[in-house]
Amino acid sequence: MNKLKQLAGDTATYGLGSIVGRAINFLLVPFYTSTQILSVADYGIVSELYAYVAVLNVIYLYGMETAFFRFVSKDPKNADTIFNTSVSSIFFSSLGLSLLLAGFATPIVNWLEFAGQERFIYWFAAILAIDALVAIPFAKLRYERKAGKFVSFRLINIFLNITFNIFFLYFCKNIYTGNFLPGLKPIISLVYNENYSVEYVFISNLLANLAFLPMFAKTFVKVRFGLNWSFLKPMFLYSYPLLFSQLAGVTNEMFSRMTLKKMLPEGFYPGLNSQEALSIFAACYKLSIFMTLAIQAFRFAAEPFFFSNANQKDSKEIYARVYYYFVIVGSFAFLAISLNLDLIKHIFLSNPTYWQGLHVVPILLIANLFLGIYYNISIWFKIKDKTYIGTFISISAAILTIVLNIILIPHFGYEGSAVITLITYFYMSLTVFLIGKKYYPVPYNLKKTAGYFLIAIVLLYVGWHIESSSAVVSQLLKEIPVLLYILIFLVAENRNFRFNGN
């Protein structure tokens, strides 16, 4: 139980930074979707381009972050050499990839149907390079359990990104147009381009990322750049299957947003063009962030935790307990968020245009729960150095995602994409579990976790059918199923906490 408390403490620390940071960053969603800031179509551009960036982020890192964890855990005496080799490898590859992107900027923007916007590619080439360069130093902080510094650096980046967005898209825009403080227009004109809109979203990201460089200045000064092939070769052999695995994984998440605009028949949604439909789906997808936050916090803490406990005699029992409580908490999050969407939409999506896509959010929440389960139980193939199995699962899932989206989007729109996301993540979690039973059997309590999930489904169904003439009363009544879930948990787990919670 002490091991679980350690993991819970690390998850809470990373989770605080992740949840607070991402929650603050999530405030950009109501900011962007406000009619005064970006049009529905413009937000679609932001969503589409960042979907491609997510894929490129994986290519820029090519699994080296996980390889660093694995090799430094196995050989802590050579931690400095492993770190220097990892950073050097990322530096040289990122430089090459960014130069390649910049060189092909024109054909890229033409294919994306953003002709004449090569500057988008130049900015993202720099953003991606910086993200990749600081990834290993961030991984080192996690390995050394310097969660405070890790969280602080991430929060500073997020605060800067938000500050620059508000400065350019709100203050500069309104001062320039004379809505307030017209006397500052001559000064603002020095940094503000009235023809820019979505451009300032990307510029803000770039400026915030540049701040990482002084944060890690001391770290980079100590780096001895050079490629130690005795470490780099086995690290690359370990990481390259993860590249394909992670690339396939991000394809599962982002493929619909990358291609919805191109595959959706014009006029599929009355009154909306394809770019606007993409914007609505992307905005509603963002509402599943509350589940994503928990998964991200868990991953930050769990990966080094799992590796460090791999050689313990009771490691499998520890992993089983982690899975057990993860599913319980995830099922609760699914229930609570789904029953509060009517409240959430007023807070985060002030433009009613986006509300027509809210019905896909519960589906996406369940999908993300299964993705979390996959991350939870897939650690075995990293521990057993069988990363090729993860590659097989992720690539087959990516193929499933691509094929089903191509078939279903023209007929079912983004609703089809939401269901496909659920199917894909369920397939991944089921497959990794079945294969894991052969190579690394863990005594997961499937019956009880399935019971908690089914209880959440039933309570959600009940909550959806609670109605009152008063919207306020209806919303309050919907909290009863949420409280019931908590009560069921407390009663059912009372014995475990009484005897094992010391």
Image (cartoon, rainbow, N blue to C red):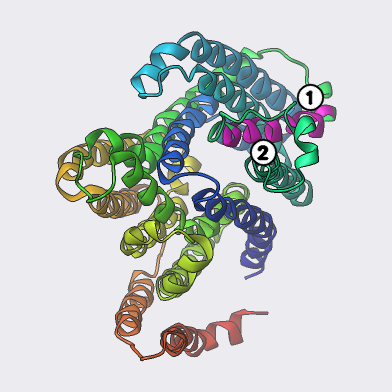
Q: Is residue 203 magenta?
A: yes
Disc nearer the start of the sequence (1/2): 2
Q: Which residue is mark 1?
A: 220
Q: Give the amino acid at mark 2.
A: Phe
Q: Is residue 376 magenta?
A: no
User: Predominant secondary structure in magenta?
Assistant: helix
Residue 22 horizontal side relative to residue 77, left or right = left
Question: In the rendered view, would you say 329 is above or below 431?
Answer: below
The kind of secondary structure element at disc 1 is helix
Q: Give the quadrant of residue 96.
A: top right
In the rendering, which numbered label is found on residue 406?
none
**Residue at left offset 54%, top offset 55%:** 30
Q: Locate residue 330, reporting x and y percent.
A: 46, 67
Q: Give the amino acid at mark 1.
A: Phe
Q: Which residue is mark 2?
A: 168
Seen from the viewer's position, the closer of residues 38 and 475 is 38
Give the magenta-colored segment's residue range: 200-217
Disc 1 from disc 2: Cα separation: 31 Å
